[in-house]
Image (tube, coloured by chain):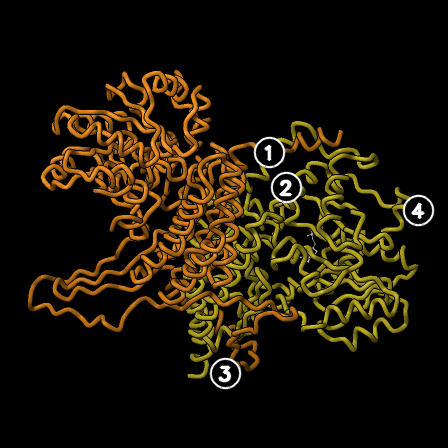
Amino acid sequence: MELDFQKVIDISDTPVARRAQVDAVLERARWASQAFQRYDRDMTLAIAEAVADTAYEKAAEYGEWAVRETGFGVAEHKTIKNQLTSRTLFEHYRDHDFVNPRIDRARKLVEIPRPAGVIFALAPSTNPIATVNFKVLAALLTRNAIVLSPHPAARECCTDAAHTLARAAEAAGAPSGAIQVVTDPSIPLIEAFMRSEKTNVILATGGNAMVRAAYSSSNPAIGVGPGNAPAFVDATADLRSAARHLIESKSFDNSVLCTNESMVITLAQVDADLRKALQQAGAHLCSEEETAALRGYLFHSRGFNVEAIGRDARWIAEQAGFRIKPKASVLVTPVTKIGVAEPLSKEKLCPVMGYYVARSVTQAITQARALLRMSGAGHTAVIHSRDAATAMDYAAAVESCRVVVNAPASQGASGFATHLPPTFTVGTGFFGRSAIGDNIGPKHLIQWTRLAYNKDEAEEMGDYSALGPRFSGPIPPAPADGVPGSAAAPNVTRLPRAATPVTAEERAMREDIRRIIVEELRAVLRK
Amino acid sequence: MSEAKQEFLERSKEFWNPDKTQFWQDVGVDLVIDRREEYFLYDLDGRRLIDMHLNGGTYNLGHRNAELIEVLNAGAKHFDMGNHHFPALARTALAEALAACTPPNLKYTMYGAGGAEAIDIALKSARNATGKRKIVSIIKAYHGHTGLAVKTGDERFSARFLSEDTIGEFIQVPHNDLEQMEDALRERDVAAVIMETIPATYGFPMPREGYLPAVKALCEKYGALYIADEVQTGLMRTGTMWAITRYGVEPDMIVTGKGITGGLYPISCCVASEEAGQWLKQDGFAHISTAGGAELGCVVAMKVLEILQRPTILSTVNYIADYLRAGLNEIQALYPDFFIGIRQNGLVMGLEFNDPEGAKPVMRQLYEHGVWAIFSTLDPRVLQFKPGVLASQALCEELLGYVEVAIGLAQAEVFGARQRRAG
Ligand SMILES: Cc1ncc(COP(=O)(O)O)c(C=O)c1O
């Protein structure tokens, strides 16, 4: 009986209820973002640092939790990623100023940073906590409010992490609601968030469908699609070091980073030596049969076998029906084709790496382009070479916004092993049907209002050196009159200057005058 | 004014309420509310107004709140008012929900159709429970217009109908005055003290710190029950579900109405302790109300309570309260001689002006600028300023812009008159 009654009045699964839920969260975020814009740089940095410290302390705990919940990756590696996206990231940006105006006297320009406002951010199941850390810090550094939407498979660890970071932020003085999380993400709910006019920008990291949905939402979106990085090892490369980087990167967190190498492309003259080096570095070189078995296991007619995502090499080999040495951490599968006819030339979010031998540099470059045509355009490419001319030819040809040189791709493309900006959101640019090709960072979450003076030399620029927005800090809590312990009323009740009683005569005259003034005002207002 | 509106107003005078219709024309508020949505009213002539009156919190969640309409429609596929004599799913479910979100000593819910009816039920219950007749209320209190409720209030509303108290059963004492309160209770012949937690129609004078708990202590000392009229102050408007708990008082009864059904299907509730509601065990047919606790109203009310207990609400209410206060402080600094006080607990706010009727020109100017906020009937120096709990940042910012301009113009109006008189 009672249950039936609840069902009759249950409207939770209606568009109206979803819209209300979305509005409540985004409107609170809007309040937070408006309050946040009153903060100066010191306050902002103090909050970001406190959150970075908390995320750092929790790196191992959440690293383990993420692996436990999702089954993807390696806890120690996730810990490293969580550390990189907390303290390391903060240290990188500590000296950047996203708060104060910049003055360009030569060009007579003043630029005032303007935060986006409310960021709706998706966190994928493969890099849940690192993405949460990264997006939260990027938002805080730029005084934005952020609403996180975890992938359902990583919901619990992300929700907990988001709450932990939110508490740390608020304890350090951040506006309430600056960090929120969608605790019950579902496709219709996420779509409602993305479509809402209360969302200022979407930071989409995840599957292709989700990223495309973000772009189609009618809101500005910064999305990153899949990777499928070709790694060209040419004849000039230091093979041992190249092999080490390849294996280190490919085995890192069982290859769930989309910046991982997908396919080694090398040349016949170094083929044998590279195979040997790879083996020494920890690769299991698959036989033709083993490669065929892996191909069959990893790819069905519906696409990639998600069961294999983030699993280790041994487990995958066993599933495919063969055994490998305990030390081997990457399965290398030689292929003779790159393209639709070879499934192994698609993205593989597990430690399985293709291996292709080209006859010439030209052919290698052609094959690298072919690989990125399959998927991963704009994302990441790698070259191991000591020849700048080859690196230039390669980089100018492949459709990738970054080409990592002589470094592991997973740490290189994301800026931790190179001087690219550190990120967990890699812009794929026009190649990848995205607006931004940079490594996404705080700078993409603000825009600048520019005061631009007349070029005419007679027009002198004003002195802005001591000027800036009014950083009035947190909004003081309103008093609750009569409630014990309520904030002291900053009430400016002043003694009335002319609080004399009004006579009837005075009142009548006042009425007349009021009427005249109202008439005048009406006339003015209706013009 | 359009011809259509003019014509309508004539009919309104003819068939509805000639004096009230004329009153609004006289004070310069020619409003006839047509369409309404969120916190906006649309006049018959198309003008949009931000609603800062909300009918005393009725539209706390906005006009025609979409979720409330949705649940009302869902309920209407199954329910109607119900039969008030029988155990009913929706009445009981709401009573349970109310017991869960009121202080732990409160248990039963007794239903009315409007606020005043629930007040009458509370007063009758107190008389039954204590075996005493006297009721103490606050001078300029406002609890509605039914038989008993009207006697607790200002004679302005009872004398015309020859309905004022004539036998000394209804005693009124000044707000914030504990001595007179104790004097009224000393004889131990008082059934109940009834208090609006913050007297609305009197312009939200704020209870002094410790006043309400002291009144409750006096009630206990002299064997009277404490009835908290939370019709305007309840439902998260002060950042807690009921304002009275924020002042540290566990009342014997809480009365709620208005916003409990979001203005869509009116009911009212008196939530009572076991002791206060003891007649429910003696003779459950002793009080009867056909529309009291109409089941469709209960369905809406349950949604209202659910919405008000969502985790985002408190933070939003605080933002609205803090932001508006910061803005009002700035405006006050501009017009310190005219805008002399801000009374506030959360979203319950009264703006005080330095003129015996000071809130009226402010109301009129606000109306001219697209904001509807009403003066306090029983203290027209004070403008009632009542934002909803879901008000957006954009709305509040827009609102403050109008308030600044309107107060400036109202000050010019009032002080201009004074100056001309002097000169
Ligand atoms: C505090 C208070 N109590 C009771 C009432 C009476 O409610 P109703 O008008 O629904 O009878 C009102 C109405 O304004 C009120 O403000």
Residue A3 left/right relative to B403: right
The image quadrant in which ligand 1 is located: bottom right
Name the residue carrying label 3.
A497
**Amino acid type of the residue tagged 1 in the rendering:** Ile
- Secondary structure of the residue carrying tag 2 is helix
- Secondary structure of the residue carrying tag 3 is loop
Chain letter of the residue beneath label 2 in the structure image: B
**Amino acid type of the residue tagged 4 in the rendering:** Gln
Per the model, the C-alpha gap separating discs 1 and 2 is: 10 Å
Mark 4 residue crowding within 10 angstroms, few (<14) / some (14–19) / many (20+): few
Classify A454 as above or below A376: below
At x 43%, y 60%, the residue is A35
The residue at label 3 has a CB less than 8 Å from ligand 1: no
Residues indicated by labels 1 and 4 sit on the same polypeptide chain: no
Front residue of this view, candidates A490 and B411: A490
- Secondary structure of the residue carrying tag 4 is helix
**Amino acid type of the residue tagged 3 in the rendering:** Arg
Name the residue carrying label 2.
B303
Front residue of this view, candidates B373 and B400: B400
- Residue A76 position by quadrant: top left
x and y percentages locating residue A132 in the rendered image: 43, 46
Chain letter of the residue beneath label 4 in the structure image: B
Sequence-wise, which precedes: disc 3 or disc 1? 1
Query: Which shade is chain A?
Result: orange
Name the residue carrying label 4.
B282
Residues indicated by labels 3 and 4 sit on the same polypeptide chain: no
Per the model, the C-alpha gap separating discs 3 and 1 is: 56 Å
Classify B39 as above or below B251: above
Question: Which chain is displayed in yellow in the rendered image?
Answer: B
Which is closer to the viewer, label 3 or label 4? 4
Discs 1, 2 touching: Cβ within 8 Å: yes
Front residue of this view, candidates B49 and B189: B189
